[in-house]
Image (spheres, rainbow, N blue to C red):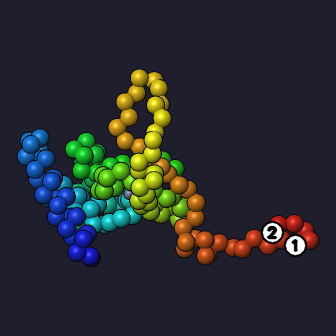
């Protein structure tokens, strides 16, 4: 793991300790393990994926607990739920304004950092609505899926 990521994880854990103290939440082993797992990855996992990677280490943890803890993190501002074309919620420990590219074949989600997109002169959306944040989502094919996609062939019978 790169040094930068390790720094990000320890900074996140420190922030969680601070927020738990402030909101009088106990700093459980489960909360710590879930945040550590989320902060260590960049694949924008679902609650199930996090559960799958920590369940062997944390005895008695359930899927429901993982989901509930992630929701708490979102409320505390430690993580964000990212919008994506799937029904499943995906989580991101990086709460800076950034954007995502979603591969419609393998469902991989990649971060997109763009000054142009992050400083858009966003129009007033109306409806007495105060906007706090926004993100731009791209859908398409990732490099891996693109190289594996069957090339389109055009024959006398048409496109196959
Ligand atoms: Zn893909
Ligand atoms: Zn992200």
Q: Earlier in the sequence, mark 2 or mark 1?
A: 1
Q: Do the residues labelled 2 and 1 touch (CB within 8 Å)?
A: yes
Could you tell me which residue is drawn at 39 percent across and 64 percent down? 43
Decide: is 31 above or below 146: above
Where is mark 1, residue-wise? 155
In this rendered view, identify the residue nearer to me: 27 or 118.
118
Decide: is 41 above or below 127: below
Q: Is mark 2 on a helix, strand or loop?
A: loop
Q: Quadrant of the C terminus?
A: bottom right
In this rendered view, identify the residue nearer to me: 121 or 44.
121
Could you tell me which residue is drawn at 7 percent across and 46 percent down? 21
Could you tell me which residue is drawn at 55 percent across and 56 percent down? 139
Residue with the most extreme right position: 156
Where is mark 2, residue-wise? 160
Q: Is mark 1 on a helix, strand or loop?
A: strand
**Could you say where residue 49 lies in the image, as x and y percent from the top left?**
36, 61
**Could you say where residue 69 lies in the image, as x and y percent from the top left?**
24, 49
């Amino acid at each position: 793991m790169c040094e930068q990521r390790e720094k990000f994880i320890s900074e996140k854990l420190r922030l969680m300790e601070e927020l738990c103290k402030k909101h009088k939440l106990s700093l459980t082993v489960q909360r710590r393990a879930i945040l550590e797992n989320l902060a260590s990855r960049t694949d924008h996992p679902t609650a199930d994926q996090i559960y799958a990677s920590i369940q062997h280490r944390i005895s008695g943890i359930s899927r429901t607990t993982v989901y509930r803890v992630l929701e708490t993190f979102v409320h505390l501002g430690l993580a964000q739920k990212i919008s994506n074309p799937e029904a499943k919620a995906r989580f991101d420990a990086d709460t800076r304004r950034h954007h995502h590219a979603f591969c419609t074949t393998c469902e991989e989600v990649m971060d997109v950092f763009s000054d142009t997109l992050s400083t858009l002169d966003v129009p007033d959306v109306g409806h007495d609505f105060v906007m706090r944040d926004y993100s731009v989502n791209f859908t398409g094919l990732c490099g891996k899926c693109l190289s594996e996609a069957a090339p389109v062939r055009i024959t006398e019978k048409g496109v196959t």
